[in-house]
Image: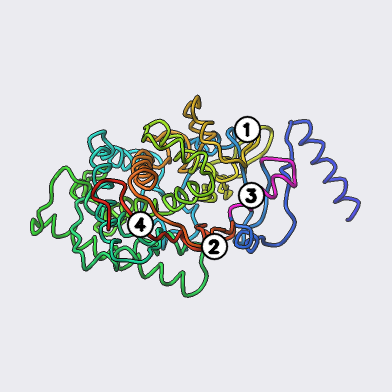
Amino acid sequence: MEEKYILLSLKKNMEEKTMGIKKIPKEKGIDNSLHVLTEGYLFISNRSHAFGSDIFETHLLGENAICLRGASAAELFYDNDKFKREHAAPKRVVKTLFGNKGVQTLDGEEHVHRKKMFMSLMTPSALKRMKEITRKQWEFACEDWKPKTEVILYNESLKLLCRAACEWTGVPLEEKEVEEKTKELACMFESPAAIGPSFWKGKKARSNAEKWIGDMINSIRNKELSVPEENALYKISMHRTLQGELLETETAAVEVINILRPIVAIAIYITFNALALYQHPQEAEKLSSGNEQKLQQFVQEVRRFYPFFPFIPARVKEEFSWNDYIFPKDTLTLLDIYGTNHHSELWSEPDLFLPDRFIKWRDSPFSFIPQGGGDHYLGHRCAGEWMTLEIMKESLDFLANAITYDLPTQDFSFRFNEMPALPHSKIIIKNIRKKTKDCLN
């Protein structure tokens, strides 16, 4: 029997070589899920470096998984004919971060139709309005900081972005609700990788938020609540499926939250904006004129350099071959977001913070993927990416040019196995003063 097995294996290997099939490098171990928690953002890159390959196979959450990194891998991953999102994300991520039946989990015509609705919200005038709202909220926040000895920038950014997100979408928000709603929205992106009480806290936060938004949607549909028709809350409430039916209330609530939550999550980027200003003073000096291009280059490098989202999942639609590697049907596949943005073949000196690299950089949908790759309209690239840039630029300009502040001794370090990663002090600032004539005295 043993000789027969060896002969069959040799025959199979010969057939694979004849067909031009290559074996994907495979990590040992019954299940390597624990390593995801201990290595975080570096999980895929660490193994890619060890294998000397941008593709390898491992075992996660009880099943085989193929891990990818790099531009060509991203181009493959965002091929909607080869990959699907249905049942790709772990249930714990759906129950906290994405929500059930949200746009991130859809495929085919249904996804394109829902995504078209989201993209219709991202008009130049709507983006300009968010930019103005963001500036106003920074001004309000600065005034609120006036009597305080010091503030934690991350926490304050969460609150001001919650206010901005609700104002932009048309969601009514009373000032007494800000703390509670901010915590609920933040819990959704702070808890997916957590274990135990933190995860359940995130799950409960989503449930509370969906009920909050769902009640509003029902009130709009019943004409008990009047909101501007051009705002996102109204458009999503009245959005109809390909079958001409209104979205289920729960699904519509998920999609409204899919605008609110990502806007609030930009607080992570804002905190890294502040860290970059501190760690790279020579680059901060280039922002003093408030030049739009310089601000753009700086925030793009923040998005490339610092960790935000580690990797994203999909499943193989039907078996196919790519670069002589076989991808079996339904195989879980992960694309390394952080690793692709630090790939040495795509970026010169990837581990250095160099905003000037974006001076002549041409927008690539596959080499620079902090919020996903591919096409915004037909693919799964984040619909709010342009909004993220506007909010980040406005926030950066305020921190660099509108105020002065001191940074007391604190822990600026962060760990790659903490998802989301943040400076441990969350950036404490004190002695905050406006640079204008009406400075805070």
Residue tagged 2? 411
Q: Residue at x 50, y 24 (%)?
A: 360
Q: Position of residue 310 (x, y in %)?
A: 54, 51
Q: Position of residue 87 (x, y in %)?
A: 47, 54
Residues shaded magenta? 41-54
Residue farthest along the right direction in this orientation: 3
Residue tagged 4? 432
- SS type, badge 2: loop
CA gap, disc 1 and disc 2:
29 Å
Question: Given the image, on which type of amino acid does mark 2 rest?
Answer: Asp
Residue tagged 1? 348
- SS type, badge 3: helix
Quadrant in which the C terminus is drawn: bottom left
Q: Is residue 115 above or below residue 140?
A: above
CA gap, disc 2 and disc 4:
19 Å
Report the front residue among 206 and 176.
Answer: 176
Question: Given the image, on which type of amino acid does mark 1 rest?
Answer: Ser
Please tell me which of labels 2 and 3 falls first in the chain: 3
Please tell me which of labels 3 and 1 falls first in the chain: 3
Q: Residue at x 31, y 47 (%)?
A: 435
Residue tagged 3? 44
Left or right of residue 430: residue 194: right
- SS type, badge 4: strand
Label 3 Cα crowd, 10 Å radius (few <14 / some 14-19 / many 20+): many
